[in-house]
Image: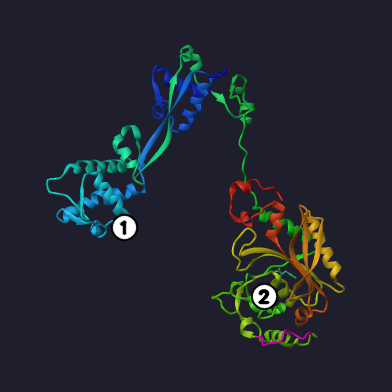
Amino acid sequence: MVVTTREMTNLERRMLRAMLANFGKTWTLEELLSECKWDDQIHVVGAGNGLSELGFVELIEEKMTNVNLGAEGLIAKESGLLEQKIISAIKIANGKIAISELESLANIEKNEVGIGIGLLKDLGIHIKGGFLEISENENSFEDIVSKRTTFISSLFEKESVDINNLDQELVSHFKNRKGLIEFNESKKRYWKLTTNSKGISEEMLTESNEIVEITPELLQSDNWKDAKFKSYDVTLEASVAQGGRPHPMQSLIERIRSIFLEMGFEEISGDYVQSAGWNMDALFIPQDHPAREMQDTFYLNNPSKIEINSERTKQWKDVHENGGDTGSRGWGGTFSEEVAQSALLRTHTTVNTIKYLEQNPKNSCRVFAIGRVFRKESIDRTHLPEFHQIEGIIMEEGANLPMLVTTLTTFYEKMGYPEVRVRPAYFPYTEPSLEIEVKWKGEWLELGGAGIFRPEVTEPLGCNAPVLAWGMGLERLAMLILGLDDIRQLYISDIEWLRNQPIL
Ligand code: PHE
């Protein structure tokens, strides 16, 4: 034992005084709580540890095994032990029961039949030619079974019993039967004075009026002059205060928002529920495009249709079937105005920008949106059925591809990824189309798509200036920034992980 010297705290004084009233005694937690008039065991544990550091008290820890009923035990308490059920059934059947009928007559499970027969055999009950038999004068097993039943009931009443207070033979019997009883280890603590405590003077035991906090009132009075101040050990480890903070995704959204605002963009938003018309047809996505299938898109039952101005659907019909006035040849085939009205959960935020353009076809603009989108994906390391996109457009006279690439490069540079490259890609609504990639840990990662809206998209809306457009995945970017290899980590609310995330 390492004994330190220091002044005792008031808690230690009180506990020591209580214990000195009976020198040789071994104290339990309950006894000390009541003797010291405390109601929180932390006081006993704390003062006890302090006193043992000072060498006045010895802490004795005893391992205890407690026994309580398991799931099967609780069932047995209600409907009887398996052997009891079978014995009762045999008695009702006048002392003889066919094994083949055991399941139904004793009202037991199929898998209990074999176990039950085993139990009965051990109790000395005979099996003859497929029958279990108990003769009238045979009752030596009754006593054993009733002891077992009492054992189970007593555990039920007391909830948990020290193994040493139980019949060891019954404990080892039930230990071998599945789920009837369970064992729990716990520690019991006792406190006992050491001989060092004999030299303690009354003065040392007197609880002092310690000042814990220095207040302006105290300093204004003269009381501080002969006050006793509680000492603090400044070398002790303290826990870190955990305040609330935004979720990393929210912080990331804020950061992206301020970057676009800084670059002169205005923020727009839109609804999750959209028509296929605005989500797809307005973007010249052919009606037989695979991404429109039920297995890729969440269509809705309520509402199942969203009304669209018939002039608009007529216009889409022309553009899709033959290009209308756009100079395009369209996709051919037959366009369904019905299909355009199907309600769905938006599959990309590009629906926001296209609707914005419909409302503002003439004025030059730079707008962005950060929003949730929905796709019927199976959840895995890199996919979620709900995720976010960062969308944007620039419409102005003379807007061109280099301007698009510079805008995106600038954005990623501001996010801390200076190495960006673009590669040719395809989207039905842009020409040219490109994919944006950033370099991370020596590898190129695709983060989004972009391009210049096709005339099939912009002309019906009445836009005359070119429209540069892009859509990027937010979670992908979050994975990069936070160094994750599983996208699900972002949304499982793991408090430890959330606390330790960097400030974005
Ligand atoms: N909507 C595309 C997507 O969901 C991204 C994109 C937006 C591509 C705008 C080109 C222009 O992946």
Q: In the image, is 331 to the left or to the right of 230?
A: right
- In the picture as drawn, the residue positioned furthest to the right comes out as 398
Is the residue 203 above or below the residue 321 in the image?
A: above
Q: Nearer the viewer, residue 56 or 386?
A: 386
Q: Secondary structure at mark 2?
A: helix
Mark 1 crowdedness (10 Å alpha carbons): few <14, some 14-19, many ≥20: few
Q: Quadrant of ligand 1?
A: bottom right
Which residue is at 29% across, 54% downward? Answer: 113
Front position in the image: 359 or 176: 176
| Residue 95 percent coordinates (x, y) | 15, 53
Give above or below for 205 relative to 101: above
Q: CA distance from mark 2 to mark 1?
A: 57 Å
Outermost residue, left side: 137
Query: Which segment did they paint magenta?
Result: 328-335
**Residue 58 point in image, percent of width and height:** 47, 21
* Labels 2, 1: front one: 1
In the picture of the structure, the residue carrying the numbered disc 2 is 279
Determine the residue positioned at 81% across, 62% down.
421
Left or right: 261 in relation to 336: right
Q: Position of residue 233 (x, y in %)?
A: 62, 26
Amino acid type shown at disc 1: Lys
Residue occupied by mark 1? 110
The residue lying at 29 percent from left, 38 percent from top is 170
> Is residue 186 inside the magenta stretch?
no
